[in-house]
Amino acid sequence: MDGKIIEISTEELNLHYGDNHALINVDIEVLKNRVTALIGPSGCGKSTLIRCFNRMNDLVDNCHIDGKILFNGKNIYDPDVDYVLLRKKIGMVFQKPNPFPKSIYDNVAYGPKVHGITNKKELDIIVEDSLKKAAIWDEVKDRLHDSALSLSGGQQQRLCIARTLAVEPEVILMDEPCSALDPIATSKIEKLIYELKKQYTVIIVTHSMQQAARVSDYTGFMYLGELIEFGKTKQIFEAPTHELTDNYITGRFG
């Protein structure tokens, strides 16, 4: 894998929702400061997989996980792992923008406050820096105390990214972050993803193969809970080794 640093990996990861075997023996290595895309038809396990990485599936009733998930070499299910701290280090941006019904400022400051930062000057710096990193500062700097709900959909999604960045994560999970956005807003998010990988590791679930091809360094194709093929994005799209991958990419099914 390029001789680079592996940030997240799984070993024989299996997940059941009751009797439903949703993830089947998934082995994947996610490289630091790279964008990894997961593609595949609906219901194939893409979102389920990334929700494993910060233990969000712990919140699902009747969910059972076997195998290992390693974050910087440590199994995130070891007894001494603090899942609250884990979710600080591995942040998540959801399919639909979900700003809190608070001001723009308070949305971004919320996480740092939860983690004990109360100094106003320090919070001001965090809010400005996070909004700048999310490429939305210039659009909102004169209206920080307006409701976040007054922003457009694309702006709300970038605000949610800023809110994630405010707690200084190492990894950003994005579950279909552009599916509710128009092409212009999507383009802004894609440009932002390219910039974010300079400082963060990004894992994106997307139904758009074109988006995966544009923004990712590595791509995994999933089908019926299995990771069928994983490799450099160019190789996956131009010379897939598995017939199922080729059939999906060329539109024969999915």
Image (cartoon, rainbow, N blue to C red):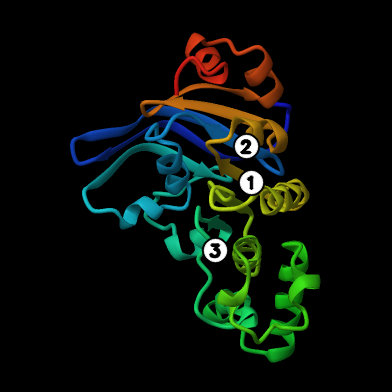
- Residue receiving disc 1: 202
> Is 69 on the left or on the right of 146, as rendered?
left
> Is 76 on the left or on the right of 133, as rendered?
left
Residue 214 location, quadrant? top right
N-terminal label among 1 and 2 = 2
Across and down, in percent, residue 182 comes to 63, 51
Q: Tell me the CA gap for discs 1 and 3.
A: 14 Å
Given contact means CB atoms under 8 Å apart, are the residues at marks 1 and 2 in contact? yes
Across and down, in percent, residue 13 comes to 39, 33
Please name the amino acid that badge 2 sits on: Thr
Within-10-Å neighbours for mark 3: few <14, some 14–19, many 20+: many
| Callout 2 secondary element | strand
Residue at the limit of the structure toward the right, as seen here: 138
Please name the amino acid that badge 1 sits on: Val
- Residue receiving disc 3: 88
Vertical placement of 111 versus 49: above or below?
below
Q: Measuring 73% from the left and 27% from the top, which residue is drawn there?
A: 2
Q: Nearer the viewer, residue 116 or 131?
A: 131
N-terminal label among 1 and 3 = 3
Across and down, in percent, residue 121 comes to 74, 88
Q: Nearer the viewer, residue 214 or 78?
A: 214
Within-10-Å neighbours for mark 2: few <14, some 14–19, many 20+: many
- Residue receiving disc 2: 36
